[in-house]
Amino acid sequence: APHHPADLYVLGTTPTSAETAAKLGLPYVYALFLNNDDTVMTEAVETYRKVFDTSLGTEPQTMLALPVIAADSDDEAEEYASQIKLVRISTESGRTLTVFSVEAAEDFCKQSEEKCTFQVQEGNVIHGAQERVGERLAE
């Protein structure tokens, strides 16, 4: 079989990561499952499209990585989805990262050599029985 190297994508959650992808001429995937802030998402995609370097011989490509839970029933999917939290950690130096539980955020802050704070958000997850999820994704 012919050898074909894997395609490269930049997965990110900020305009900075979008700019990096654009300057490298690579496709950009906005990780909505990590940062569900629509304003940041819009800014990241706009930055990517504005900065994209077509001189590298490629065209801009953007994708969304969505948080999705499909289960046998709507109730089962709701149970799973209700447990998902996004916890955004901000460090004193301005670094941010996202984890999926308060416990993980507390552990990170204890181990960090700098002060940090965190903010808990409900996970904005597309969820439901398989048919409902399919309908929502098609919207």
Image (spheres, rainbow, N blue to C red):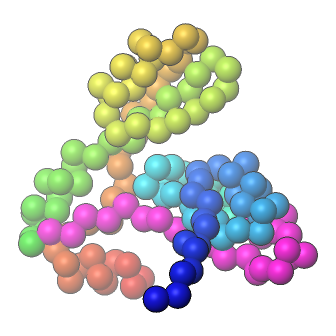
Q: How many marks?
A: 0
Q: Residue 88's spot in the image, x, y percent?
A: 48, 34
> Going by the image, does 42 lie left or right of 113?
right
Report the front residue among 53 and 13. 53
For residue 79, above or below residue 121: below
Report the front residue among 103 and 43. 103
Q: Residue furthest front?
A: 1
Residue at (35, 49) in percent of width and height: 123
The residues colored magenta run 46-71
Q: Quadrant of residue 90?
A: top right
User: Is residue 122 part of the magenta span, yes or no?
Assistant: no
Q: Residue furthest right?
A: 55
Q: Residue 66's spot in the image, x, y percent?
A: 42, 65
Q: Residue 62's spot in the image, x, y percent?
A: 63, 72
User: Is residue 68 part of the magenta span, yes or no?
Assistant: yes
Q: Quadrant of residue 110?
A: top left
For residue 15, above or below residue 22: above
Residue at (51, 49) in percent of width and height: 35
Report the front residue among 10 and 68. 10
Q: Is residue 63 visible?
A: no
> Going by the image, does 24 lie left or right of 81?
right
For residue 102, above or below residue 19: above
Instruction: Tell me the quarter of the image containing the C terminus.
Output: bottom left
Q: Residue 100's spot in the image, x, y percent?
A: 35, 39
Q: Is residue 136 visible?
A: yes
For residue 5, above or below residue 95: below
> Going by the image, does 11 lie left or right of 93?
left
Report the front residue among 13 and 73. 13
